[in-house]
């Protein structure tokens, strides 16, 4: 083994390692003996001109810290170092990924107030998505080496009026297709199945495409490839490039950037932490929604933040009216849902009908009431005949059918296959007709 690693191992096994900021200097003196506020200057005792950490000791300290590191801890530290390496050239930097994001969150990121304190967020899903994304892109680069990848130096793009580089995922200059890779959890996967790719994803990709076109590259279409993190299922969505959509997205970003530059506070685009998962995991949730103050008063953050201090009766009445009307509509919709369920509660063949399909499911419920009755009856039996073990809890299982719309990618694939089949049938019919005409001509000639 390398001599440096051997020496670091000996220090590690000996124990009593210093803190990372107290590693001795190569001159042999402790860091505390060096001059300066940061203890990085000269050392009078050894005539050392500046502090330089003992690299073997430093390696042992880092190894000891790494031995205790956690999965999420390592990912957070890597993310922190990656962000630190990105030098911002402008005071305010609005990004393509900000299209469709909550504008207030961009405000807290770019121009936070002086008293702002960031909240801890759950980054587990984002970290896993990043790992899948980076490794998948690395493998794609091996398979398709002629394609351009935005994370490679020299392939960056720039928004008009913005000097910060931005990175798209993948671009094929031969097919003229820009591809974006998205990973999804179960909720996002189900939503994508019903609604297709999110509008903000399309806006972002059209922006990247516009930037590539400005550099002289042809872009005919944009593709969004969605990968489910749980088991690797994937779906792709493709649409033609639209200059109008790209320009509209750019105008949104420019308006947001201008508002931040002149000191405006943009509106919130989410409903609040009581109902919005994005708000509940936002880094600015406490400041944005006054959560600590709301908890202290025992009210909702939305009430404290959005409702005036002394609201007029008409203001509260209007909200109450909308709430009652919404509940009445919900009740009527629930009643109609039950009526429609009854119409499909028969011996239908379980298969897709049009764009809709039945999904079988099961509900299981432990019958604790029956179990309690059985156990209670045991106490009335003589000890000699009482069983040594308690009876098992019975589980009641019922089946049900849930009707849902087919996944949007499936509908699109079926429509494409149907169109191809119709085209093939038309071509076959045309060939058959042409052949029949040839036969007829031959018969007439004979």
Image (tube, rainbow, N blue to C red):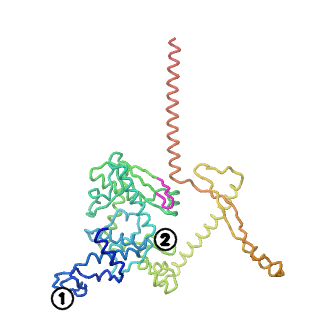
- Please say whether residue 232 is one of the residues in the magenta stretch: yes
Question: Does residue 329 appear left or right of residue 191 in this picture?
Answer: right
Between 226 and 382, the one lying in front of the other is: 382
Residue interval drawn in magenta? 227-235
Identify residue for label 2.
277
Residue 261 position, x and y percent, is: 29, 71
Disc nearest the viewer among 2 and 1: 1
Tell whether 439 sits left or right of 142: right
Above or below 342: residue 367: below
Q: Is residue 431 above or below residue 12?
A: above
Q: Which of the image's four quarters has the N terminus? A: bottom left
Per the rendering, the mark at residue 154 is: none
Q: Earlier in the sequence, mark 2 or mark 1?
A: 1
Give the residue at the far top of this rendering.
Answer: 446
Mark 2 falls on what kind of element?
A: helix
Up-down relation of residue 310 to residue 360 (above or below): below
Could you say which disc has been placed on residue 45 in the image? Answer: 1
Q: Check the image and report above or below for 86 versus 203.
A: below
Q: Position of residue 272 (x, y in %)?
A: 48, 74
The residue lying at 51 percent from left, 59 percent from top is: 231
């Amino acid at each position: 083994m390398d001599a440096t690693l051997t020496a670091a191992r000996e220090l590690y096994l000996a124990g009593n390692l210093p803190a990372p900021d107290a590693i001795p200097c190569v001159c042999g003196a402790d860091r505390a003996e060096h001059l300066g506020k940061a203890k990085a200057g000269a050392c009078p005792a050894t005539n050392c001109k500046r502090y330089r950490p003992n690299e073997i000791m430093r390696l042992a300290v880092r190894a000891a810290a790494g031995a205790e590191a956690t999965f999420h801890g390592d990912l957070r530290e890597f993310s922190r170092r990656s962000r630190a390496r990105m030098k911002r050239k402008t005071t305010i930097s609005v990004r393509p990924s900000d299209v469709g994001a909550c504008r207030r969150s961009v405000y807290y990121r770019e121009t936070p107030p002086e008293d702002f304190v960031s909240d801890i967020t759950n980054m587990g899903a984002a970290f896993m998505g990043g790992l899948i994304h980076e490794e998948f892109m690395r493998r794609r680069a091996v398979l398709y080496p002629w394609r351009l990848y935005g994370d490679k130096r020299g392939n960056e793009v720039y928004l008009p009026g913005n000097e910060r580089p931005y990175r798209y995922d993948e671009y094929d200059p031969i097919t003229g297709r820009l591809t974006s890779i998205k990973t999804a959890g179960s909720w996002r996967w189900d939503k994508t199945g019903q609604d297709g790719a999110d509008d903000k994803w399309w806006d972002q990709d059209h922006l990247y495409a516009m930037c590539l076109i400005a550099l002289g590259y042809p872009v005919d279409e944009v593709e969004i490839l969605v990968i489910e993190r749980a088991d690797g299922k994937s779906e792709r969505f493709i649409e033609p490039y639209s200059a109008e959509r790209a320009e509209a997205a750019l105008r949104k970003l420019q308006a947001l950037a201008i508002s931040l530059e002149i000191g405006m506070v943009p509106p919130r685009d989410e409903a609040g932490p009581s109902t919005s998962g994005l708000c509940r995991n936002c880094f600015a949730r406490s400041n944005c929604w006054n959560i600590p103050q709301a908890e202290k008063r025992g009210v909702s953050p939305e009430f404290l933040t959005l409702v005036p201090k002394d609201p007029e009766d008409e203001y509260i009445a209007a909200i109450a009216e909308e709430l009652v009307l919404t509940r009445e509509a919900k009740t009527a919709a629930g009643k109609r849902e039950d009526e429609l369920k009854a119409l499909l509660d028969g011996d239908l063949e379980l298969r897709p009908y049009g764009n809709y399909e039945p999904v079988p499911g099961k509900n299981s419920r432990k019958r604790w009431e029956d179990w309690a009755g059985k156990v209670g009856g045991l106490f009335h039996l003589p000890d000699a005949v009482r069983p040594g073990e308690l009876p098992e809890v019975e589980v009641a299982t019922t089946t049900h059918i849930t009707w849902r719309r087919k996944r949007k990618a499936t509908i699109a694939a079926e429509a494409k296959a149907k169109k191809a089949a119709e085209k093939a049938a038309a071509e076959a019919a045309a060939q058959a007709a042409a052949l029949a005409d040839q036969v007829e001509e031959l018969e007439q000639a004979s």
